[in-house]
Image (cartoon, grey):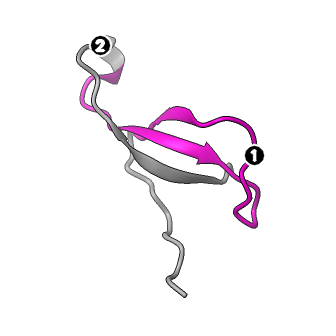
Amino acid sequence: MHFARVMGSLVATAKIPPLKGYPLLWIQPTDPRGADVGEPLVAVDPDQSLLSRPSKP
């Protein structure tokens, strides 16, 4: 499992055919405690598998 925080979604004006219709997410990889690790990146989420959202304090 990889941990990341979703920072937003992206819209592509053109996609390669295998990715057509799949959501693109702008994510920041994190460690299990939520601290940033590395650079933000784009992820494809074909199963729309956002598992949980952080609770509000």
46 within the magenta span = no
Q: Position of residue 30 (x, y in %)?
A: 70, 52
Neighbor class of circle 2 (other Cα within 10 Å; few <14, some 14-19, many 20+) is: few
Neighbor class of circle 1 (other Cα within 10 Å; few <14, some 14-19, many 20+) is: few
Q: Position of residue 4 (x, y in %)?
A: 61, 51
Q: Is residue 17 above or below residue 50?
A: above
Identify the element where label 2 is drawn: helix
When asked about the image quadrant of residue 32, the answer is bottom right
Label at residue 55:
none
Residue at the spot of label 2: 17
Residue flagged by tag 1: what amino acid is it? Val
Identify the element where label 1 is drawn: loop
Residue flagged by tag 2: what amino acid is it? Pro
Give the distance between the C-alpha atoms of the residues marked 2 and 1, in whole angstroms. 31 Å
Write the start and end of the magenta stretch as one range: 19-45
- Residue at 34% from the left image edge and 18% from the top image edge: 18
- Quadrant for the C terminus, please: bottom right
Nearer to the camera, 18 or 27: 27
The disc, 2 or 1, on the residue closer to the chain's N-terminal end is 2
